[in-house]
Image: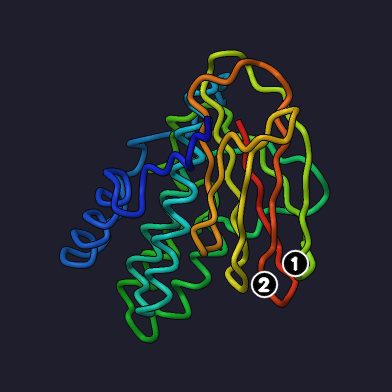
């Protein structure tokens, strides 16, 4: 039985909610949270469900960022940055993630032009020790690793999911190529596949049986691409 990619966006409720936020923020303008309203606590232990929700939010932020780039909309890009800012992650490997709140704020700054209100908001979000919109609802966050894939290259690895606890895997490309994702069992049968012709495929297995699962990430494009891989 093949379980298809479990996206909670791309027309789903979380993606719709994200764009409702974009619309509201664009209409009303961004305001900083009151000083001291929220302080980032020490990260709590993550559960598979927490990490799965965090992965969904990261990929949704990537979609909102793409929407903002197409329209050169700095306010929408700030929304994407604030979505990423909520999510902590556990980095593995030497390469740093490229989809970060700081990187999106740099893009928002480029779109801001001479909009002083927008530039001031970006400065507030960058301020060292800033308080407000800093508490993560996701615990310590998912595992993130970055790989560079040549044109048409497949990168694969094996994971051992917790039995009957949700498994979510995402692969976020840098935007230059189409990235596909598949999860396969020990016999090579496809458990989940996302070939949606975009650069942020996601797979969800709701009740894995605990047996090893092979993850395959494919760069379908004609040029190399960085890929930010997320698992819980």
Q: Which residue is mark 2?
A: 221
Which percent across, then down, holds residue 180? Answer: 61, 56
> Which image quarter: residue 67?
bottom left
Q: Residue at x 73, y 53 (%)?
A: 96
- Which colour assignment does the render follow? rainbow
- What mark, if any, has residue 152 been given in the picture? 1
**Residue 83 position (above or below residue 112):** above
Q: Is residue 175 left or right of residue 36?
A: right
Image vertical order of residue 223 relative to residue 149, above or below: below
x and y percent of residue 189 in the render? 66, 35
- Residue located 34% across and 72% down the image: 118
- Element under disc 2: loop
214 lies left or right of 33 = right
| Above/below status of 225 relative to 204 | below
Dot 1: element: loop
Above/below status of 95 relative to 6: below
Q: Where does residue 215 sit, x and y in percent of width and height?
A: 70, 40
Query: Foreground: 20 or 111?
Result: 20
Pointers 2 and 1 in contact (CB under 8 A)? yes
Image position, residue 159 (x, y; %) = 73, 29
The residue lying at 70 percent from left, 19 percent from top is 211
**Frontmost residue, 151 versus 193:** 193
Q: Going by the picture, which residue comes out furthest to the right?
A: 94
Foreground pick, 215 / 95: 215
CA gap, disc 2 to disc 1? 6 Å
């Amino acid at each position: 039985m093949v379980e298809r990619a479990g996206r909670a966006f791309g027309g789903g409720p979380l993606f719709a909610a994200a764009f409702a936020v974009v619309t509201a923020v664009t209409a009303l303008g961004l305001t900083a949270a009151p000083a001291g309203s929220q302080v980032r606590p020490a990260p709590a232990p993550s559960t598979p469900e927490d990490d799965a929700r965090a992965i969904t939010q990261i990929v949704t932020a990537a979609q909102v960022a793409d929407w903002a780039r197409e329209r050169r909309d700095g306010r929408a890009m700030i929304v994407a940055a604030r979505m990423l800012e909520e999510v902590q992650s556990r980095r593995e490997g030497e390469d740093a993630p490229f989809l970060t709140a700081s990187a999106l704020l740099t893009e928002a700054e480029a779109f801001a032009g001479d909009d002083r209100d927008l530039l001031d908001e970006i400065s507030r979000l960058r301020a060292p020790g800033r308080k407000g919109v800093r508490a993560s609802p996701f615990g310590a966050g998912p595992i993130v690793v970055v790989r560079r894939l040549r044109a048409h290259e497949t990168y694969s690895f094996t994971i051992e999911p917790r039995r009957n606890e949700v498994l979510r895997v995402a692969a976020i490309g840098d935007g230059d190529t189409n990235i596909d994702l598949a999860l396969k069992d020990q016999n090579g049968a496809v458990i989940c596949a996302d070939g949606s012709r975009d650069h942020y495929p996601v797979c969800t297995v709701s009740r894995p049986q605990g047996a090893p699962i092979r993850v395959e990430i494919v760069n379908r494009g004609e040029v190399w691409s960085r890929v930010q891989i997320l698992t819980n």
